[in-house]
Image (cartoon, helix red, strand yellow):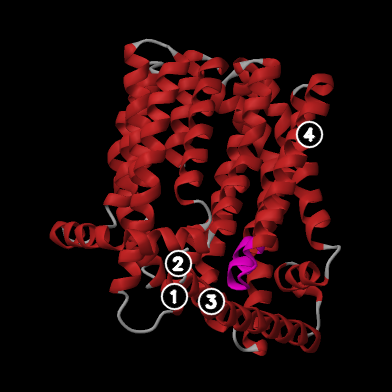
Amino acid sequence: MTSLLAATILLGRSAGPASLGDLSLVLATVAILQAVSIGGISGAALHKMVVHAGDRTHLVRTIVAARLLLVPATFLIAVLVLVVLLGRGPIFAAALGAAICGYGIGAFDVAEIYRNSKSQYSLIAGRRSLLVALLFPVKCLAAWKGSLEGVLIVQGVEAAMWQVVLLPRFVEVWSVLIQSLSQLRAGAAEVWELRSLWLSGITAVLSTRSDIYVIATLVGVAQLGQYTTASRFVEAASIVAVAVTTVVFNDLARSANLGSNYAKTSRSAARQVLGLSTSLTVLLAIAGPFLIELLYGDAFKEAAQLVPLYAITLIPLFQRQLISKILVVEKRYTLSLFSNVVGLGLNVALNLILVPHLELWGAVLAAILSYTLTILVVFLPTEQGRRILAISVWSIAMSDERLTNICNKAIKARRENDDESEVDAPKAGRVEAGKHRRGV
C-alpha cells in the first residue's frame, strides 16, 4: 500500500486527477474479481487451519482445489471482457491484462493462509517488505513518467509475487497442485458449504467499491480521482484494521470454546480496534489536508477538503473488520451475507441520492452513513445480532460476569447449530441413497 500511495502521488502530479480516476477503476475491478474468486472463504479456510489438529495435507489440498475451480476462470474471463469493453488500444490492453493476471495469481492465497495459521507473521512481513522494496523504484519511475500502463504492469507483478514469495520449495508446490486436481469435487463441496460466506465476501467488497462506479458515472473520472485521493489515506489506514484483526483472529478461534477465555480475548481485540481507529481518525483529520496538498499539489485541493470528514469512516470500518472475524468464529455465514447485502444496498442508494445534489461531499456522507447504518440495522433487531455486537464492540464497557455469560450463550448456540448440521447430513445422505436405489 505504501508503494502504491507513492505511485499515485507521482502519477497525480504528472498526469492529473483523471489518471488517478482510471487507476481507481482498475483497482476496484480487480478487488471485486478477487472477492468473486475467493470471497470470504479465506477466513473460513484460515479458521479450519487454526483449529485443525494433526496432519493438514488433505485440508490444504481441498483448499487448493477450491481455488483452482474459482481463480483461473474468474480472471481469464475478466481479462477478455475488460479488454473488449474498454477499447483503449493494444498497449493499455496489454497492461490491463498483465495487471489482472497478476492479481489473479495473487488471489491464490493458500500459502498465506498456511503461514498465518502457524503465526509466521515475521516471515510474511519480511518477505513482502523485501518484495515491495525491490519493485518500488520501478513503480515510481513509471508513475513519474506519467505512464498509467507502466504502473499497472508493475502493480500486477507485485500482486502476483505477493503470494509467490510465501511459497515453500517449488517441488512441494507442484506436487500439491497435481494432487489437488483429484480433490476438485471436495473443493466444490467446500465452496458450496461456505456459499453464504463466499457471497458475503463478494458483497462486502462491492459495498465498499460500488461508490467508485457511481461517482465515475455521475461526475466523471477526474472527480473520481479527487474522491479516491481523499479516500486513499483511509484505505491505507484500514489495512491496519485487517492486519490487527487477522492477528487477533487466531486467539479468538482458539479461545472460542470457553466463555471466560472468549470474553477476555474479545475484549482485548475490541480495545485494540477502538483505540487504533480513534487515534488514526484524529490523526488523519488533522494532518490529512496538509499532506494531500503537500504531496499531490494544488490540483488536488478539493480532495484535501474532503479528508477530515472522510476520516470518520475509519471507526465503523475497523468495527466491521472485527465483527466479520467474530461472525466466522461463530459460523454465522448467513448473517454475514445479510450484513454485506444491506451495506451494498445502502451504499448504492445513498450515493445515487446524495451525489447528484452534493457531488463529492455527498459521496463522503454516503460512505459514513452506509457503514454505520449497516451495523445498526443488521445487528440491533435480533438477539443473535446483539450478541455478536456485545462480543465484538460493546465488550469494552461490560463487566466480566455479563460478558462471560454472553460468550457462554454464544458457545451454546454455536454447538446447537453444529449438532443440527451433523444430524441433517446423515439424513441428506440417506435420502440421496434412497433416490439411487429407486433409480431416480
Task: Of the two numbered discs 1 and 4 on the same chain, state the one appearing first in sequence.
Answer: 1
Residue type, numbered disc 1:
Val
Marks 1 & 2, CB-CB < 8 Å contact: yes
Closer to us: mark 4 or mark 3?
A: 3
Q: Is residue 331 magenta?
A: yes
Residue 50, disc? 1
Magenta-colored span: 323-333
Could you say which is closer to the camera, residue 38 or residue 440? 440
As shown in the figure, which amino acid type bears the numbered disc 2? Leu
Q: How many marks?
A: 4
Crowding around mark 3 (Cα neighbors within 10 Å: few <14, some 14 to 19, many 20+) is: few
Helix, strand or loop at disc 2? helix
The circle on residue 425 is 3
Residue 205 in which image quadrant: top right
Q: Residues within 10 Å of mark 4 (few under 14, many from 20)?
A: some
Mark 1 or 4: in front is 4
| Residue name at image x 81 percent, y 85 percent | 402
- Label 3 sits on a secondary structure element that is helix
The main secondary structure of the magenta stretch is helix
Q: Earlier in the sequence, mark 1 or mark 3?
A: 1
Q: Horizontally, is 109 left or right of 314 in the view? A: left
Please, what secondary structure does the residue beneath circle 4 have?
helix
Label 4 sits on what residue type?
Answer: Ala
Q: CA distance from mark 1 to mark 2?
A: 6 Å
Tell me the quarter of the picture where residue 231 sits: top right
Label disc, if present, on residue 349 of the rendered structure: 4
Image point (84%, 20%), residue name: 357
